[in-house]
Image (spheres, grey):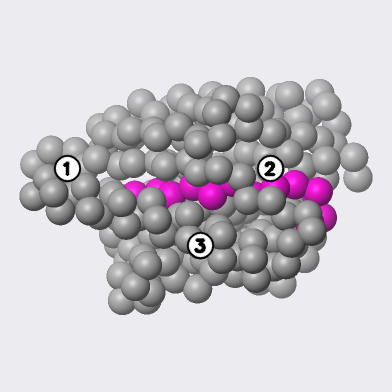
Amino acid sequence: MPVDPDQQAADIRRFHKWARRIRRLGHLLRRISYHPPEIGDEIPRRVVMVANHRSLSDVFVAIEALAHYDFPARCLVRAKYFEAPGAGRFLRTLGCIPAGDGKRQSIEVAKETLEADRPVAVMIEGKIVPPDRREADGLGEIRPGFIEIARAGKADVLPIALVNTEHIWRSRGRLPRIPWRGRPHIEVHTGRLVEVEGRSDEEIMADTRAMIAGYLAEAQQSELRRA
């Protein structure tokens, strides 16, 4: 079903409204810095934005970052989070798309969103990855669903690295941490486009992983130099 332009405009206004609220509240819990995209100012609107996933705080950081760059993407979120009355209502208000758990409809909704020139955002590991489940490059197993979405919507992929988000909310924590000794510093690194057309899934997966892992390693080295 084609996306209604008026409805989409209303959804985008609502997204920015909530992003402002998240920014005000988030300021109490952490500092955040944005590292601009390597591709300059011209980011295509039809793009699948993908990021690593270490904490429940990633959703809030991602929404704030997307609003910062004026990219009100529809985020794919695991379907189970929509089942909780409060969380589900919040996610629907933001225009999030239920994903996983066999919900193939999410691919079609994401495709229609891209065809309406609105970005889609995906956590490519599919779930929060605690430290003991990460590979040496700092990432867990990457799921290929984002490539299927990109192909369906004739879009490219834009990798984003979220750094230190577990310092706000531990990977296995039930609640965010209160910053008694200074707010943790969160970084958002936005890379360059990974082309999809004419390339294999393996090539796209490798390029995407390498770019996010590179930013994670760079941030870790910077942290070690400051210590």
Which is more foreground, mark 2 or mark 1?
2
Name the residue located 50 percent from the left edge and 73 percent from the top edge. Answer: 141
Residue at 17%, 42% in the rendered image: 179
Q: CA distance from mark 2 to mark 1?
A: 35 Å
141 in relation to 69, above or below = below
Label 3, on which residue? Answer: 209
Q: Which residues are magenta?
A: 151-163
Between 17 and 152, the one nearer to me in the picture: 152
| Amino acid bearing label 2 | Val
Identify the amino acid type marked 3: Arg
Dot 1 crowding, Cα within 10 Å, few <14, some 14–19, many 20+: few
Q: Which residue is mark 2?
A: 47
User: Which of disc 2 and disc 3 is earlier in sequence?
Assistant: 2
Q: CA distance from mark 3 to mark 2?
A: 17 Å
Q: Amino acid at mark 1?
A: Pro
For the question of whether residue 26 can be seen, the reply is yes
